[in-house]
Amino acid sequence: MQEELVLVCNEKFKDFPIGNFPFDPHHSAMGEYHCYIPEGYRGNWYDPVVYHGWNGSGPTWIVTEEDGKKFMEQTRVLAALKNLWPMLVTGDEFWQDYLVEAQVRMLSTISPAHAGIMFRYIHARSFYALLFQDKKLKLIKKDQENIEVLALCNFNYDCDTFYNLKVECVGSKLIGYVNNKKMVEAIDSSYTRGKIGITATMPAQFTDVRVLMNHQAYKNYLMAKNNWVQVEKNLQCEYPQPVLWKIIDFKNFGAGRQIRFGNLPENNQKFMIIAQHQKRVHRDAYANISCLTAIDFDGNVMWQIGEPSSQKDHAYLTADLPFQVCDVDLDGVDEVIVARNFKIMILDALTGKIKKQISAPFSDETDKLYSVPFGQYAFDRVNIDSIRIANLTGKSKPTDIIVKDRYSRLWAYDNNLELLWKFNGKNTGHFMFTKDIDNDGKEEVVVGYHLLDHDGKLLWTLSVESDHTDEIVIGPIDPERKEDIIAMACGDEGFILSDLKGNIIKRHLIGHAQRISVGNYRPDLKGYEICVTTYWGYQGIIYIFDCKGNLLHQFEQPVPGNIITPVNWTGDGRDLILLSGHVQHGGMIDGFGRRVVTFPDDGHPILCADSIDVTGDGRDEILLWDEKKMFIYTQQDNGIKSNVLVPNKYPIINGSNYRGEFSFYNT
């Protein structure tokens, strides 16, 4: 007698209304560092694919119906995919041995389009799949850039028929069926567990997705799942959990991740500067600050420049805005360094009054610019994209000012706004990183794939062919090396480690590497660990590497905006990784990927997240906000803990949405 199987997934899409599966109609970069989730019903599914080239082209997936039966339909054509595989994912990462099946109809059978089911899905770049392609049935393994055909056979499918595709995965044995007939078989042990999904590269319909397990497999799954959950619960008891410290009302001057922090001189308490903007010419390419508001942490407005707006379009931006807070004249009081309306200004941070200003530089060498909308620069003067405070002149603290256009040119000024030098690197990435590498008391500049000396002289350029750097970290990551190393998230060029002479140490093609951070995420290992996350293409994959760039852990988040900031939460030398404010999928994880700190379901915003020591006990608080309110959380044992270890963290004088973040101890 055949054993009765346990049904763990039975998806007929009957609970979905006809229409679009939720998606961002702009296919924007919001999810790079905002937990921006389009509204709509998803059931238990999520879409891990995002591509800016689909802006205005509608949804990838729609729900259709015929004779009362619902179908999930993939709508994009092969020519629009840029080698991406549209997919929807569901299930549990702890599913091990199971049977997965679905009814699949290819609405276009052109070559080399495919359609089928994914299984033992780790993330969108690592899984098995059973696919129809090129009039064959293929059992494949995808591992990052590599696709290996494990088994195949001829199969003459057509565009009118629904076929039952089915896979049995038991241990290392993988068997593929069509209409309950065994067709292909392979042995492979690369992936032992994972979720399931549907995928197609031309229009196709899917329905009746089922996952079944025998009783022993189901028992094993529950045991693995419950063990993980119990470990997380135990760790959550060990780590202090967050308690709400303060709520700040932003009224009509709030923004997304366009906030900088400074210190009030009379009591060293923090204040914040919030920037709103207007978009000009083309999307986010030439944003201009429309309003600056300074408030203390009780929400009192200290000063305001410009006109505030409650429109989301003035609050939401997928770029940096050019402003920082730093004591650049070394008088003990912070200034605000800001570029606005083609001027570079130094403002008194306590009053907002102008102390110094100059006009932005004229835009020259426009034939050597990278990624300019429509191939034509829009203005005579440069629209400043970002600002970094650096020490180029050998003072006791950083007081010099580097301004940058969107992707190509830098201008360096001293604290009197006198020009020091300029540089055209053609491809300078999003944001600079500065550090005194040669120990001469003056900082070098890593911008894009270039290293510049303090005087702007080009020292070397990495041999990287395309795309731009999104984030950079320099530091003592590997204790076996005498010198610092450079860690970079380089978009489609992946994750790169380099020495200080421009030699690439390690490189991983992991998808579009978007964010990077370094911290003591695994105190049981030597050196510091590196966390990298992806966005464009296949979003939300989080990788954790050791100090030499060897992969330790990888998993995929079903929500965007994972900022992977290192957090000094316990004050004992262990760093946690902040994901987002999402109640279910956010919180903070350790270096094993375990969710050890979660946020309460108290109605807090989830759009933006950051960490900074606000209460002054040496440990970080967590700030969660949107354009309306900010919720600030501290530890439940705040004010009790003593002997707090305070790491050298990324400086608040250089806020950016493209800052590679770090937490180094004893440096």
Image (cartoon, grey):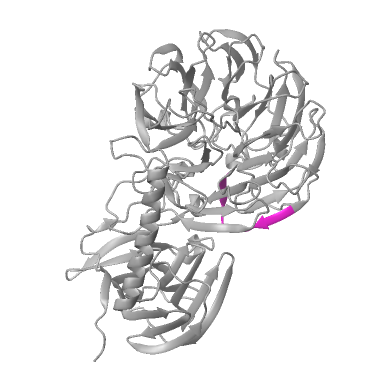
**Quadrant of the rendered image containing residue 390:** top right
Report the residue that reaches farthest toward the bottom: 1
**Quadrant of the rendered image containing residue 345:** top right
Q: Main secondary structure of the magenta part?
A: strand
- At a point 67% along the width and 12% down the height, the residue shown is 330
Picture coordinates of residue 380 (x, y %)?
A: 64, 25
Picture coordinates of residue 60 (x, y %)?
A: 39, 58
Residue 514 falls within the magenta-colored stretch: yes
Q: How many marks?
A: 0
Q: Is residue 369 visible?
A: yes
Picture coordinates of residue 274 (x, y %)?
A: 46, 23
- Tell me the quadrant of the picture where the N terminus can be found: bottom left
- Tell me the quadrant of the picture where the C terminus can be found: top right
Residue 312 falls within the magenta-colored stretch: no
- The stretch in magenta equals 505-516
Residue 133 placement, left or right of 216: right
Residue 13 placement, left or right of 588: left
As displayed, is residue 13 above or below residue 665? below
Q: Is residue 586 visible?
A: no
Report the residue that reaches farthest toward the left: 68
Which one is in front, 328 or 105? 328
Picture coordinates of residue 154 (x, y %)?
A: 47, 88
Which one is in front, 666 or 472? 666
As displayed, is residue 418 above or below residue 142? above
